[in-house]
Amino acid sequence: MDNIEKLQKMIDEVDNIVFFGGAGVSTESGIKDFRSKDGLYNMKSKYSTSVENLLSSNMFYNDPKTFYEFYKEYMNSLDFKPNITHLYLKKLEDKGKLKNIVTQNIDGLHTKAGNKFVSEIHGTIYENHCVKCHKFYDAKYVFSSEGIPKCTCGGIIKPDVTLYGEMLPSGAYSNALYSISNAELLIVAGTSLTVEPASSMINYFDGKYLAIINKDETPYDFKADLVIHDALKNVFGKLK
C-alpha cells in the first residue's frame, strides 16, 4: 500500500477530520509563501528592513505608508483562485467528514472554495476596520485606495490580520484548539510547523491518526502516523 492509499484509508475510516494548513496550501494558486527559496523572505527587496518588520504592528502604527506599500504589493490575493487542495477539502466537507479547516493563511481561498467551517488563526485580508471608529471596510476598498486607506471619519483602516507582534484572534484560536483536540484524523499540510504559537497547536491532538504532508521535513514528523514529502497537488489530486 503506497502513501496515498494509506491516507485514503485513514480518511475513509473516520468521520471527524480537521485540516491544519499553512502557506504551502496556497502556493499552488500562485501566492508567494514566506520561507521557501522563492518566498518573501528570500526575495530581493528595495526595503532596508525585514519582512517581519514590514508586516509588524510596530510598522503599521509608526510608518503606515511603508506598511501599506508592502502590504498592498504582496498580500493582495483578490484575483487568486482556489486550487486542487482547496477544492478537495470542500468535497470532504460536503461529505460531512471534514469538521474544520485551521489555516494560517490570510488569503481567504478556503472560503472562496466554498468551505463553511474555517478558523483563520492569522485573520483575513477580507475584513478591515477603522482604528478610530471601528467601521468595516472590505478588501477591495483597501487594496484599491491611494496610499494609506482612510475611513470616512479620518482614521486609518487596519486589516484584521495578525501582524508580527500581535496575539492570535481569540475566537478563531479557541475554535481551532477545540476542533483539533476532538478530531479523529488531523491532516497537517503545506506548513513548516516552525511558527509559534500556531505550530504547537497540533500538540492538542490526541486522536486516531496524524498525517503530515509537506515538501520538506517538519519538527513534528516523528509524531505522525503518516508523513508524505511531496507537493500537495500530487497528494490531494489523487484522493477520492
Image (spheres, rainbow, N blue to C red):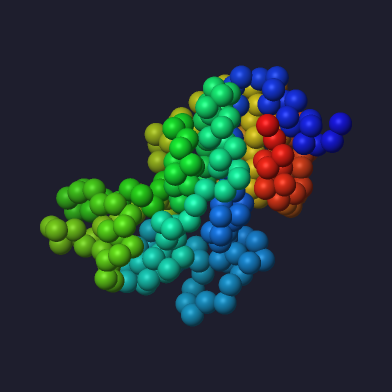
Residue 185 appears left or right of 47: right
Residue 239 appears left or right of 67: right
Residue, far right: 1
Residue 62 visible, this orientation: no
Front-most of 100 and 81? 81
Q: Residue at x 61, y 54 (%)?
A: 28
Q: Residue at x 64, y 31 (%)?
A: 186
Task: Classify residue 35 by image quadrant.
Answer: bottom right
Quick check: 58 above or below 168? below
Which quarter of the figure is the C terminus placed in? Answer: top right
Residue, far left: 153
Q: Residue at x 69, y 22 (%)?
A: 12
Residue 223 appears left or right of 22: right
Total label count?
Answer: 0
Residue 133 visible, this orientation: yes
Front-most of 155 and 138? 138
Quick check: 105 above or below 4? below
Q: Residue 78's x, y, as percent?
A: 41, 56
Front-most of 88 and 211? 88
Task: Classify residue 75 by image quadrant.
Answer: bottom left
Q: Residue at x 70, y 19 (%)?
A: 13
Q: Residue 169's x, y, as percent?
A: 40, 41
Which quarter of the figure is the N terminus placed in? Answer: top right
Q: Residue 63's x, y, as percent?
A: 33, 70
Q: Residue 93's x, y, as percent?
A: 53, 29
